[in-house]
Image (spheres, grey):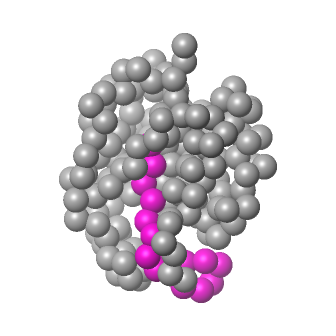
Amino acid sequence: MAKTLIAFFSRADENYFGGAMRYVKVGNTEIVAGLMQEMTGADTFKIEMKEPYSPVYMTCIQEAKKDLRTGARPELVSYPDSIDAYDTIILGYPNYWGTMPMAVVTFLERYDFAGKTILPLCTNEGSGMGSSERDIRKYAAGARVRKGLSITGSRAAQSGETVRKWLKENGLV
């Protein structure tokens, strides 16, 4: 039987919402990942950095920019023992500087994705998927990377219908 894993990076604290800063207790990507988990019953794994980015949004994005420019691979708090049991991985992340956070790259480079399907989920405030789909193909060689889902972060909690449609298109509901 096919199994699905929802692996996601999400950041709470101060976030950007359509032109304004707002403090949130749960990050936008985590909200959407939760909706997906409710709809699919899939396992979840939160990608967390041992040294998280600043809770201050403007500082966080500068830290993320530095990591991207230097090709950093932030150490994660934990890792799944294996992803062998999963056929499909929904990979969720916010758009940082036109792609995924480097912690997601750390996660991708740890496993063999040959023969697996990756469904990218990217939250953003209008910048879309950026180059993340292409970048996932680079870091998860051998994976079949399907067309991703771009969700406006400030509308994450209201994205249920869009999420359900995308999951249905990909045979998960």
Could one spot residue 83 in this view of the protein? yes
Q: Nearer the viewer, residue 48 or 123?
A: 48
- Coordinates of residue 5 in the picture (x, y in percent): 48, 34
Q: Is residue 69 above or below residue 88?
A: below
Q: Main secondary structure of the magenta part?
A: strand
Q: What is the magenta range? A: 7-21
- Coordinates of residue 83 in the picture (x, y in percent): 36, 27
Q: Residue furthest bottom?
A: 20
Q: In the picture provided, is 121 more to the left or to the right than 171?
A: left
Could one spot residue 129 in this view of the protein? no
Quadrant of the image for the N terminus? top right
Q: Nearer the viewer, residue 43 or 98?
A: 43
**Point 43% across, 76% down: residue:** 13
- Coordinates of residue 107 in the picture (x, y in percent): 32, 43
**Point 35% across, 67% down: residue:** 64
Q: In the picture provided, is 106 more to the left or to the right than 132?
A: left
Q: Is residue 56 magenta?
A: no
Quadrant of the image for the C terminus? top right
- Coordinates of residue 74 in the picture (x, y in percent): 24, 56
| Residue 9 image-quadrant placement | bottom left
**Point 39% across, 74% down: residue:** 61
